[in-house]
Image: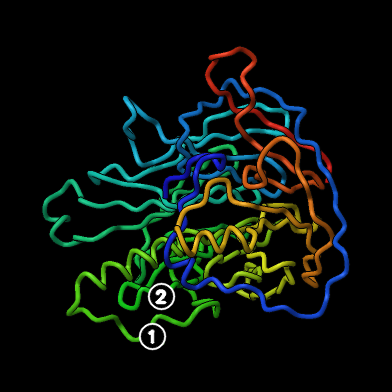
């Protein structure tokens, strides 16, 4: 899914709006501690291109290295739907990371990327095989996991043979994976554990299993197409983030107030967060295993605007520090410099962001900068 930098208008899908529910008022909450964090001491990133269109939003590994995927443009058109992946270290060193991609297909895109503990994984969806016989035998999309170590070494391209479409993936240091996707018949979200070879191991009990829901009305193609598109958009908004060697999942639009903690064994713990003023959970930042969580939310006012207009200019977002075991809100983090949606990492007790800095000269092109500060 294409992403513009968060300072631009944010397109919000109909499915998320339809499923969103404001938190019902409960017991009065204690005053939330406010913590102001200055992310204005920036470092220029001249080695990082700024096409203005992100294939992968900025994210980070549990050790604090940041990653983002820039789509390459030529004359305003996207050259390839596979983003160029870049790593930005804590010292602002920029390195392009080559990821393996299938070469025997006419088209491919990459809807999801994850930076784990010493491992990187991207989902690749390929279609239209170059070989005509293969094209007839496999008319739909073929999914791959593109895997390297954190430096881009030891590349592997794992072809998946699953009964559902795959949109997101995360890797464990044990070698296995968790994937998110969509059942092809019911259009329901799917979460599953895979082995190191990409073989299916088990479904995770996060959503109804594929067989639990009846299929849609195949006699109404327009309605089926709308349902499928809404499901794709909703699943695309789900987020997987590292927490040490474990994986965290946020599912805005499906569950607006919980984080799911997933272990390599397949054990899942649901942590509910009592957000104030009807705010809705939008995502969670990657962090180390000893860090408290940092979640991103959207205000009730912005959510209301979404439900009415389906688009929001500069949505009202907030960052909260959360106890990872109880879900208790420890404080609101007010950042100065970037927008809350541009903060990409909460590892090592810090916040880090990559955002467009103010040009030093009038008319100069926009440049991306890095900023970090203790939280």
Q: Earlier in the sequence, mark 2 or mark 1?
A: 2
**Res 6 → quadrant:** top right
Residue 24: % across, % down: 67, 78
> How crowded is the residue under tag 1: few (<14 C-alpha within 10 Å), some, or many (20+)?
few
Secondary structure type for disc 1: loop
Above or below: residue 275 compared with residue 6: below
Q: Residue at x 70, y 53 (%)?
A: 318
Res. 26 mark: none
Question: Is residue 260 something that shows in the picture?
Answer: no
- Relative to 123, say whether 45 is above or below: above
Residue underneath mark 2: 188
What residue did someone put label 1 on? 213
Nearest the camera: 143 or 221? 221
Residue shown at 13% from the left, 59% from the top: 136
Residue 353 appears left or right of 322: left
Tell me whether the residue at label 2 lies in contact with that at label 1, contact meaning CB atoms closer than 8 angstroms. yes
Along the viewing direction, whichever of 245 and 359 lies nearer the viewer = 359
Would residue 226 appear left or right of 61 to someone viewing this image? left
Residue 7 occupies which quadrant of the picture?
top right
**Helix, strand or loop for disc 2:** loop
Residue 208 drawn at (x, y percent):
47, 82
Q: CA distance from mark 2 to mark 1?
A: 8 Å
The residue nearer to you, when weighing 212 against 10, is 10
Crowd class of label 2 (few under 14; some 14 to 19; many from 20; radius 10 Å): many
For residue 113, above or below residue 76: below
Examine the rendering and report whether any part of residue 271 can be seen.
yes
Residue at image position (41%, 87%) is 212
Give percent across and percent down for residue 227. 33, 71
């Amino acid at each position: 899914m294409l992403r513009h930098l968060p300072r631009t208008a944010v397109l919000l899908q109909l499915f998320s709006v339809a499923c969103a529910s404001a938190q019902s008022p409960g017991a009065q909450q204690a005053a939330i501690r406010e913590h102001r964090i200055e992310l204005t001491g920036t470092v220029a990133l001249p080695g990082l291109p700024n096409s203005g269109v992100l294939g992968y939003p900025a994210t980070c590994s549990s050790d604090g290295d940041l990653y983002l995927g820039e789509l390459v443009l030529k004359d305003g058109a996207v050259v390839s739907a596979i983003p160029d992946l870049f790593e930005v270290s804590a010292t602002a060193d920029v390195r392009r990371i080559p990821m393996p991609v299938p070469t025997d297909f006419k088209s491919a895109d990459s809807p999801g990327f994850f930076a784990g503990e010493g491992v990187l994984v991207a989902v690749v969806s390929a279609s239209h095989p170059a070989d005509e016989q293969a094209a007839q035998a496999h008319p739909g999309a073929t999914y791959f996991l593109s895997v390297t170590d954190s430096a881009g070494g030891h590349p592997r391209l794992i072809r998946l043979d699953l009964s559902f479409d795959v949109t997101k993936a995360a890797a464990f240091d044990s070698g296995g994976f968790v994937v998110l996707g969509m059942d092809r018949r019911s259009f329901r979200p799917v979460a599953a554990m895979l082995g190191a070879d990409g073989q299916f191991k088990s479904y995770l009990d996060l959503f109804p299993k594929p067989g639990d829901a009846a299929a849609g009305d195949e006699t109404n193609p327009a309605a089926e197409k709308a349902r499928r598109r809404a499901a794709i958009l909703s699943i695309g908004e789900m987020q997987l983030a590292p927490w040490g060697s474990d994986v965290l999942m946020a599912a805005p639009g499906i569950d607006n107030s919980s984080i799911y903690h997933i272990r390599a064994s397949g054990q899942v713990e649901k942590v509910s967060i009592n957000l104030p003023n009807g705010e809705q959970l939008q995502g969670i930042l990657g962090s180390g295993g000893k860090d408290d969580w940092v979640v991103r939310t959207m205000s009730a006012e912005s959510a209301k605007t979404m439900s009415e207009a389906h688009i929001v200019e500069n949505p009202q977002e907030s960052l909260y520090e959360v106890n990872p075991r109880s879900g208790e809100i420890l404080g609101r983090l007010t950042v100065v410099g970037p927008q809350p949606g541009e903060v990409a990492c909460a590892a090592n007790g810090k916040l880090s962001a990559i955002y467009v800095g103010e040009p030093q000269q009038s008319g100069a092109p926009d440049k991306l900068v890095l900023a970090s500060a203790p939280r």
